[in-house]
Amino acid sequence: MNTPPDAPTADAPATDVHSERRSRLMTQLGEDSAAVIVSSPERNRSNDTYYDYRPSSDLWYLTGFEEPHSVAVLLPGHEEHPYVLFLRDRDHAKEVWDGERVGVERAKEHLGADAAYSIDQLDEYLPKLIAGRERLVYSLGKDETMDRRVIKAVKNAQFLTRRRRPTPETITEPAGFLHELRLVKSAAEIEALKHAVRISGLGHIRGMEHTRPGLTEYQIQAEIEYVFKKHGAKSPGYPSIVGTGVNACVLHYIENRATLKEGDLLLVDAGAEVGYYTGDITRTWPVSGEFSGYQREVYDLVLRAQMDVIRMVRPGEKWKSLHETAVRTITEGLIDLGLIDTSLDEAIEEKLFRPYFMHGTGHWLGIDVHDVGTYAVDGKSRVLEPGMAFTIEPGVYFHPDTEAEFPEHFKGIGVRIEDDVLVTEDGCEVLSDNVPKEPEAIEELVGSKL
Ligand code: GLY
Ligand code: MN
Ligand code: MN
């Protein structure tokens, strides 16, 4: 497999891209606000080892900074230091073990900070920085230790300003501002997302090529994640779902220990995270390279529903119409298969499709696999705009324990087909179209490299 050309990244050079984002956010927030954006905590894995560190998406989006124990404070309109960064001090003894740190002295030059302080000074300086601003923009509830420190800083800031009035007066979620920005991707972000999705697709292709009965789910996972890593992914964007037989009916199955059996399907939902953008692709293929008649009926139905939705995507379309279309096509198909025996309208009204199609049709995609941004605005469905990226992923599942009754021959069949799309000026681009989904093309690929 050829290595694709160097990844376009949305973070190089760090200061330009991220500085523009900070400026846009600060313009929206206005001079009455201060924003405090914190890094994710490190998480212990076992004894003295830690899970791979992954920066908080919001902090990385705004700063490009990847180190733990950091906090960005944005002060719109501040004449000297609208962007203040708290970060770890340099420490030779620690750097010998864990790698180089940027350190306070280099934060201005490397990260474009207007002022930088040691993270150890956060409790002392934060109250002074936010005092006098009416609103503090901070995401509560993600890190209790940091929540306590921020609330204490608010109290101390109110103490500092008590002769006027207590400010900050409110703490507001950043979602309404920051996540609106993240929802519409810039040209650089689109390139980065396309790259991650392409690599995700190459992983799926290799997974198909290396499938045969007798192998295990984790061996297929290894083939797929090998491709991700080989092309620069630090890790998958979420735990890979590799489920054969009835495991395909477990939506977030990540155990991946079972053996692939002749005649079963294999459902793979996996995406590579490259440069902090992730793909999210699902394909379902027959272990032995040929769909059975019943599997094919279910597969064709899911594919039809997915294509019906993809054809709708364009600026101005309502988000919720996409799911309504998937529901309609799938419900029609379930009626045709003899699984529902009411009229289409009644089946939709009564949600009789739910035992078989129990999840949404998609979600925003970007730095997070379930990317930020609301699906409704002022109580009305979000309307699509160019630059929005999301998944389209209908599925039909016949879990043996479901309450619905269905013929034995459908038992254990689970099919999902998931692509990643970008809304363009006049329609959409399917970013994951390098992975076949036509059943004949899939059948040809399965086991072809063994
Ligand atoms: N991979 C999780 C999802 O498709 O939402
Ligand atoms: Mn998804
Ligand atoms: Mn997925």
Image: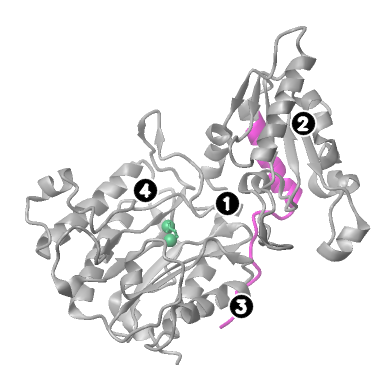
Picture mark count? 4
Q: Secondary structure at mark 1?
A: helix
Q: Is residue 17 magenta?
A: yes
Q: Amino acid at mark 4?
A: Arg
Residue name at image x 43 percent, y 59 percent = 420
Comes first in the chain, label 1 or label 2: 2
Highlighted range, magenta? 1-26
- Position of 60 with respect to 102 (left or right) is left
Between disc 4 and disc 3, the foreground one is: 3
Q: Amino acid at mark 3?
A: Thr
Between disc 1 and disc 3, the foreground one is: 3
Between disc 1 and disc 2, the foreground one is: 2
Residue name at image x 54 percent, y 52 percent = 368
**Picture quarter with the N terminus:** bottom right
Q: Residue furthest top?
A: 163
Q: Secondary structure at mark 2?
A: loop
Residue 23 visible somewhere in the drawing? no
Residue designated by label 3: 3
Comes first in the chain, label 4 or label 2: 2
What is the number of the mark on residue 187?
1
Q: Position of residue 54 (x, y in %)?
A: 66, 56
Q: Secondary structure at mark 3?
A: loop
Residue designated by label 4: 314
